Amino acid sequence: MSRQAIAGRRWWDRPALPYLMLAVSPLLTLPISRIVLASLPDCGEDEPWWELSHFEIALLPSLADLLPFLWLVSGTPDVRRAAIVAGLMGSARYAIPQAATLIYSTSSGGQALNSQCTISSYFVLVLAPIMLTLWLLSALIVAVILLRARRRLVDRPD
C-alpha cells in the first residue's frame, strides 16, 4: 500500500492503532488498578490478605488489553490483521496474570483463621514483575512489527 493511500485513511482506520493501544493500555490501567487494590477489604492480621474475588477486581482494568479487538470491525484487511495480532497479545497479557492468581490462590491455603483469604500481599510482589515483563515483551514485539511495516513502506515505490 502506498503512502498516499495510508495518508488518505481515517485516523482510526490505520494498522498501527491496535498495536499502539496495546502498548499504552498499561499506562491507563495501572493507576486504576492501584486505587482498586488500595481500597480492597483486608482480612489479614499482620499483613494484608485478600479474597480471590476481591483481588480479581483489582485486575479488571487490565481488560483494556483486549481493546485492540475493537479494530476487527474495520473494513481494511491490514487493520483487521493488526487487530487480531494485537488482540491475541493482549489476551495473553490478560490471561497469564489471571491464571497465576488462580494457581496461587488454590495453592496458598490462605490464612489459618480465614480460608477465604487466599491472596497474600506478598503475591503482588511476584505478580507485578510478571505483568511488567509481559508488557515489555509485548512492547518489544509491537516495536518490531511497526518498524518492519515502516521499512516496507519506505522500500516500496509510490
Image (spheres, rainbow, N blue to C red):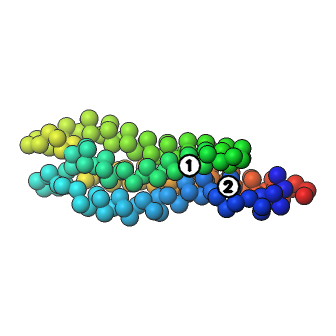
Query: Which residue does the numbered mark 2 point to in the structure image?
Result: 13
Q: Is residue 53 left or right of residue 15?
A: left
Q: Is residue 64 left or right of residue 122?
A: right
Label 1: few (<14), some (14–19) or many (≥20) C-alpha neighbours in 10 Å: few
Q: Amino acid at mark 2?
A: Asp
The mark nearer the N terminus, 1 or 2, is 2
Residue lying furthest right = 157
Q: Secondary structure at mark 1?
A: helix
Total numbered badges shown on the rendered structure: 2
In the picture shown, does residue 72 fall above or below 37?
above
Could you tell me which residue is drawn at 38 percent across and 64 percent down?
31
Q: Secondary structure at mark 2?
A: loop
Could you tell me which residue is drawn at 49 percent across and 42 percent down?
92
Q: Nearer the viewer, residue 139 or 86?
A: 86
Query: Which residue does the numbered mark 1 point to in the structure image?
Result: 70
Q: Amino acid at mark 1?
A: Leu
Q: Position of residue 145 (x, y in %)?
A: 68, 51
Could you tell me which residue is drawn at 35 percent across and 58 percent down?
33
Q: Is residue 142 left or right of residue 126?
A: right
Q: Nearer the viewer, residue 136 or 40?
A: 40
Residue lying furthest left = 113
Label 2: few (<14), some (14–19) or many (≥20) C-alpha neighbours in 10 Å: some
Could you tell me which residue is drawn at 23 percent across and 56 percent down?
40
Q: Position of residue 15 (x, y in %)?
A: 68, 53
Q: Is residue 140 visible?
A: no
Q: Position of residue 36 (x, y in %)?
A: 29, 59
